[in-house]
Image (spheres, rainbow, N blue to C red):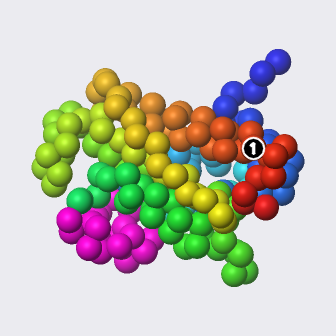
Amino acid sequence: MNQDPVTALVTTLTKYGLTVATAESLTGGLLAGKIVSVPGASLVFNGGVVSYHTQLKHSLLGVDAELLAENGPVDPLVAQQMAEGARHTCAIDGRPADIGLATTGVAGPDPDPQTGKPAGTVFLGIATRHDSRTVPLSLTGDRPTIREATVAATIEEALTELSTLGTGFPGQ
């Protein structure tokens, strides 16, 4: 019997003694909520930051202020820096989370007034101790559908990252 992806994420993190932290914008805490809905998540989930307002991406997560001013909050590098910031902001006893996950984008229904980017434009950030990356998404649907699809894609990307455990996971 296969586990659902979020249970698989918590199970895998637990198996390897790894932790995760989140930084969310368009998902507004939905990602963290999915993770903590799994029994045992307290062993692996350090915490999360909902940085819905652009200024909080800088003040809480350390996203470069000039980057935000020039490119706005819906940007691949912003997602990457949010994920890195989540790892450090949600450190426990001075130890950053092993994996940081971030979501930023436009859920719609209309283009974002700050950026002019169309609804469905989403960037995921994934950060470990040695590496970070961004995953661009172009989603369709209404606001709840885009938010749910973003969470599902983020969990799948985290599982992809964890699938490298056999070859020396960079978070260890």
Residue 72 is covered by the magenta coloring: no
Residue at the spot of label 1: 164
Quick one: which residue is furthest to the top in this view?
1
- Relative placement, left or right, of 16 versus 8 is right
Which residues are drawn in magenta? 50-70
Q: Position of residue 160 (x, y in %)?
A: 66, 38
Can residue 43 be seen at all in this image of the molecule? no
- Relative placement, left or right, of 152 versus 37 is left
Q: Residue at x 20, y 65 (%)?
A: 70
Please state which of residues 116 and 23 is positioned toward the viewer in this rendering.
116
Q: Position of residue 134 (x, y in %)?
A: 47, 49
Asked which quadrant contains residue 43, the reply is bottom right
Q: Position of residue 64 (x, y in %)?
A: 35, 73
Q: Amino acid at mark 1?
A: Thr
Q: Residue at x 29, y 58 (%)?
A: 73
Asked which quadrant contains residue 150, the reply is top left
Q: Residue at x 53, y 41 (%)?
A: 154
Q: Residue at x 74, y 35 (%)?
A: 8
Quick one: which residue is furthest to the bottom in this view?
94
Please state which of residues 48 and 134 is positioned toward the viewer in this rendering.
134
Q: Position of residue 131 (x, y in %)?
A: 61, 59
Query: Considering the image in quadrants, where does the N terminus appear?
Result: top right
Query: Considering the image in quadrants, where does the C terminus appear?
Result: bottom right
Residue 105 higher or lower than 172, as above or below: above
- Relative placement, left or right, of 24 versus 166 is left
Residue 54 higher or lower than 102, as above or below: below
